[in-house]
Image (spheres, rainbow, N blue to C red):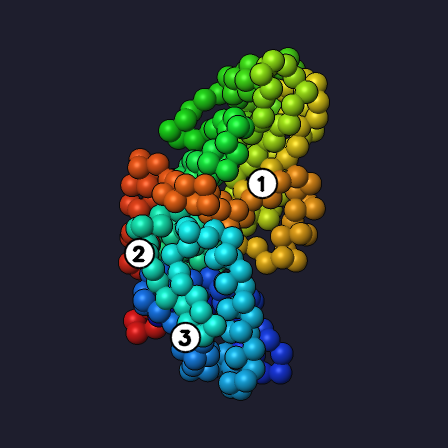
């Protein structure tokens, strides 16, 4: 299996110092990228041998909680799950290249738990950001069948000036353009907006549900929860009806964290399992082109993940 994370799983004697999301990510990653199955006993033994716990009963408590959380998460993506989970064992049913979206989001999440491993690949996160934006779009296209999902984020491969982005969005929505030069700087690329999601009526008139969505693929995603800033976008475009915010991250959020951050977003929050829920609409939902790019990005990172026997 994979080596224990260097963050999120700490020495626990009288109280649990293990973050449940770190433990769940480690178990998922070990199955998807390293071993074909794990039992509850295997995970408990790894925590004891790694000197995280001395007491097997205490270790069993946290592993039981992780098992419950993993079973719940896998039920959300139904036929898209790469795992089979019983009360005592989790087994791999599909290899990681067969579930490129799951693998990609999981690898992005591991950046939080394995900092040294993440730093091996440098500090340029442009490609992962582009891939995550495109993955989020393809997921929402499957799940919101009668909505329009428009990619707006600036990137090295999509060098579109903010003025053109604003004009394009306003034209899509049938809204009027505001004073762009007054409310943004010359260095602004996309004004923190990656996707526009809206549901038009047949009459193509205004007064429709609109979400302005930010994609944050890095471990510091919480620092971006305030984006995109509606106060700015309502100046750039004269919305007839106020739009709502949406925010996407590849991390899997526990319920308390999900509710707290959903309140901060004050709109639609899309975490890893909401992205992967597209499998409920179409089993192999990732386009062939994006699939190849996700596999290529993931392959070298999987090869260099820290293993217990390394």
What SS does tag 2 mark? loop
**In the rendered view, does 298 fall on the left or right side of 108?**
left
Say if mark 3 contacts mark 2, CB within 8 Å: no
**In the rendered view, does 185 fall on the left or right side of 240?**
left
**Residue 238 at x, y = what percent?**
68, 17
Mark 1, residue position: 247
Of residues 179 and 165, the one drawn nearer to the viewer in this rendering: 165
What SS does tag 3 mark? strand
Q: Earlier in the sequence, mark 3 or mark 1?
A: 3
Which image quarter holds the N terminus? bottom left
Q: Residues within 10 Å of mark 3 (few under 14, many from 20)?
A: some
Q: Earlier in the sequence, mark 2 or mark 1?
A: 2
Q: Which residue is painted at 56% across and 70% down in the image?
A: 65
**Residue 160 at x, y = what percent?**
45, 22
**Residue 266 at x, y = what percent?**
69, 40
**In the rendered view, does 296 fall on the left or right side of 280?**
left
Q: Which residue is painted at 66% across and 42% down in the image?
A: 265
Mark 2, residue position: 95
């Amino acid at each position: 299996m994979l080596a224990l994370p260097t963050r999120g799983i700490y020495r626990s004697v009288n109280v649990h110092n293990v973050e449940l999301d770190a433990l769940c990510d480690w178990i998922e990653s070990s199955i998807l990228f390293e071993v074909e199955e794990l039992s509850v006993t295997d995970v408990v033994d790894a925590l004891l041998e790694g000197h995280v716990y001395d007491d097997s009963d205490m270790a069993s408590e946290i592993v039981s909680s992780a098992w419950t959380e993993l079973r719940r998460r896998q039920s959300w993506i139904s036929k898209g799950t790469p795992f089979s989970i019983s009360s005592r064992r989790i087994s791999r049913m599909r290899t990681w290249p067969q579930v490129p979206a799951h693998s990609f989001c999981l690898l992005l999440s591991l950046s939080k738990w394995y900092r040294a491993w993440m730093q091996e690949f440098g500090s340029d996160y442009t490609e992962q950001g582009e891939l995550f934006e495109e993955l989020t779009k393809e997921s929402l296209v499957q799940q919101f069948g009668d909505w329009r999902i428009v990619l707006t984020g600036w990137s090295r491969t999509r060098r579109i000036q903010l003025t053109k982005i604003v004009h394009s969005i306003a034209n899509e929505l049938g809204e009027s353009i505001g004073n762009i030069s007054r409310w943004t700087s010359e260095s602004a690329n996309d004004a923190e907006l990656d996707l526009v999601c809206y549901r038009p009526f047949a009459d193509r008139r205004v007064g429709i549900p609109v979400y302005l969505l930010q994609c944050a693929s890095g471990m510091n995603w919480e620092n971006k929860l305030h984006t995109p800033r509606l106060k700015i976008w309502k100046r750039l475009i004269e919305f007839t009806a106020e739009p709502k915010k949406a925010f996407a991250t590849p991390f899997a959020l526990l319920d308390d964290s999900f509710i707290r951050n959903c309140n901060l977003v004050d709109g639609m929050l899309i975490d890893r399992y909401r992205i992967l829920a597209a499998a409920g609409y179409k089993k192999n939902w990732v386009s062939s082109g994006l699939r190849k790019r996700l596999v290529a990005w993931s392959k070298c990172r999987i090869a260099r993940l820290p293993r217990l026997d390394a």
